Image (cartoon, rainbow, N blue to C red):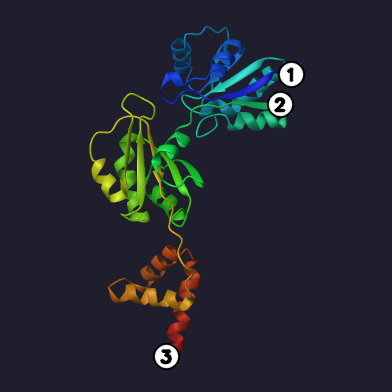
């Protein structure tokens, strides 16, 4: 007899957001695979429930090794529940590899929906939410952060990121360097908790705001890029020439125009070369 595998969302701050189904599944489970077993015990105590389930530590470093055994328990007829520290498992948290293992063994995966920092931040942001992308945690190193932002420079959907509070200022500086000072951003701090804070403004404004001690969980919501009208190769050349006239090297000007317009740098370079040849002939 086959058991069941559940991914269960847990509160992101306010214990009152725990669903009745979450309480029920934690009470009846045979195994609770928790990102942090200590937080799992605290959650169970805060919910005021009693469970006889085995509680396994199930964090990123052990997920791949433990997934086959957990699926084996399901195949033996047991109920296995996966929980993260907060929110939905597998969304920037352990769970993805386990789901892949379950699918490969023909095990049905069920979900117990609930709180999500991503959706909560989007809902309160005031930015367009008809289309959005979730980008997870920003890279820790500045160069990698900027490279990621460069790849998203022309993304027109609203973007959601997670960030650690002690890296927030540096992250905002890198975001401003790529997206520009006027890009709209919303900082959501400690969502659903006592000291919940939602701050809206431009990147330049929020860099100033964040230059202080900041604690708690941070979710960033950033406005997408504005659609740009299609430009012709002749216009590419004009934009490059304008930059060169104010002191940029031709190489840097070509790279900047290509980045801003979202076209291949080689195409802009070729257009400039063709223009130069035509002017000489």
The alpha-carbon separation of the residues under discs 3 and 1 comes to: 78 Å
Farthest bottom residue? 281
Q: Which residue is mark 3?
A: 280
Q: Position of residue 230 (x, y in %)?
A: 49, 69
Q: Position of residue 63 (x, y in %)?
A: 57, 27
Instruction: Examine the rendered structure and indicate whether residue 42 appears above or below residue 205.
Output: above
Q: Which residue is mark 1?
A: 2
Q: Which residue is mark 2?
A: 107
Instruction: Examine the rendered structure and indicate whether residue 276 appears above or below residue 149.
Output: below
Q: Is residue 259 left or right of residue 2?
A: left
**Dot 1: element:** loop
Instruction: Examine the rendered structure and indicate whether residue 261 appears above or below residue 33.
Output: below
Q: Which mark is residue 56?
A: none
CB under 8 Å between discs 2 and 1: yes
Q: Place residue 121 in its image quadrant.
A: top left
Mark closest to the chain's N terminus, 3 or 2 = 2
């Amino acid at each position: 007899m086959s058991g069941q595998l559940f991914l269960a969302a847990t509160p992101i701050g306010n214990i009152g957001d725990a669903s009745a189904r979450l309480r029920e599944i934690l009470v009846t489970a045979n195994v609770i695979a928790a990102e942090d077993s200590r937080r799992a015990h605290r959650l169970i105590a805060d919910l005021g429930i009693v469970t006889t389930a085995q509680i396994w530590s199930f964090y990123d470093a052990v997920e791949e090794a433990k997934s086959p055994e957990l699926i084996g328990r399901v195949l033996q007829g047991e109920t296995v529940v996966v929980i993260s520290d907060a929110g939905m498992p597998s969304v920037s948290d352990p769970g993805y590899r386990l789901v892949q293992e379950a699918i490969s063994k023909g095990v049905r995966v069920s979900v117990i929906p609930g709180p999500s920092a991503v959706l909560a931040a989007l809902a309160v942001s005031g930015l367009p939410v008809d289309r959005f992308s979730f980008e997870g945690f920003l890279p820790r190193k500045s160069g990698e952060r900027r490279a990621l932002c460069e790849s998203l420079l022309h993304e027109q959907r609203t973007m959601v990121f997670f960030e650690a509070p002690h890296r927030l200022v540096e992250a905002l500086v890198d975001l401003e360097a790529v997206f520009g000072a006027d890009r709209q951003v919303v900082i959501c701090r400690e969502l659903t908790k006592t000291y919940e804070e939602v701050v809206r403004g431009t990147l330049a404004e929020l860099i100033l705001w964040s230059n202080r001690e900041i604690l708690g969980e941070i979710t960033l919501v950033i406005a997408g890029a504005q659609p740009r009208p299609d430009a012709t190769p002749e216009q590419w050349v004009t934009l490059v020439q304008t930059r060169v006239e104010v002191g940029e090297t031709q190489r840097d000007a070509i790279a900047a125009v290509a980045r801003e317009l979202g076209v291949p740098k080689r195409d802009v370079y070729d257009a400039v070369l063709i223009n130069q040849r035509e002017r000489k002939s």
